[in-house]
Image (cartoon, rainbow, N blue to C red):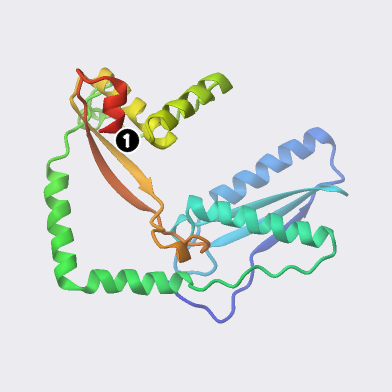
Amino acid sequence: VQVLEEKVNLPLTVIDISSLGEEQKRQRIVQIQLKSINKPFHIHKSPLFKWTIIKEHEQGFIFIFNIHHIIFDQWSQQILKKEFALLYGAFEKHENLELPRLKLQYKDFAAWHNQQFNYSPIKEKSHRYWQDKLKAIPRLKLFGGNANRTGGTNQGSTFRLVVSPEIATSLKQVSVTNNTTLFMVLFSILNILLARFSGQKDIPSILGASGRDHPLLQDIIGFFMNTLVIITDIDYDAGFNIFLQN
């Protein structure tokens, strides 16, 4: 659902730290960032975003943009960055720039989406389909054990790896040779890795899909993302290229 408001006060805070020493500036910037991150949104109060501009010195500013995930996804982030850069670039050159008007708004998508799910045959069929699918999902048994059942926590972590240009080129070449995307190559590698760690044949994964299937949705800021459950069948006897094609 999208709620339209006639009038909203834009939550912009400007903080001038230009008079502080360099070490004090660094500490103050961290404090401001943490305060912005940790202050909760109230989902029933508009707007669900807030801006902070920190003035470091006469020609140096930090722009903090904090927004609730319910109205914004990762695709939206790229739209915002692109449009901000275009407008800022025009402003620097003292030019007037008007962004192209959107043919659809998020409210159009919300109405279409709700119309789909209010149609009983589709709603019931979809519900039954996913109930059956989700019952059949195998648990991924990694060497850490099933922490939830033994009094552990649900905490996870992120592992970040930057590959060398040579490996990146090789991975891209594999995708070109097999007529697949680079994402499919990396996803196949991840599944094989999880299969080796777990010793399982069926590997469950959750992927985020953009949810922007229609071209007119691609330039709209909003939450479109959909979560898809994928179960990959690992054939240990097949070569990597055959597995990738499958």
Is residue 72 depicted above or below 23 in this figure? Answer: below
Residue at image coords 67%, 57%: 84
Q: Nearer the viewer, residue 8 or 199?
A: 199
Residue at image coords 47%, 54%: 73
Quarter of the image that includes the N terminus: bottom left
Q: Position of residue 29 (x, y in %)?
A: 71, 42
Occupied quadrant, residue 116? bottom left
Occupied quadrant, residue 115? bottom left
Residue at image coords 75%, 58%: 88
Q: Position of residue 50 (x, y in %)?
A: 60, 59
**Residue that carries the numbered disc 1 in the rendered image:** 154
Q: Nearer the viewer, residue 53 or 45?
A: 53
- Can residue 98 be seen from the camera position used here? yes
Q: Position of residue 6 (x, y in %)?
A: 55, 82
Quarter of the image that includes the C terminus: top left
Residue at image coords 19%, 32%: 139
Q: Secondary structure at mark 1?
A: loop
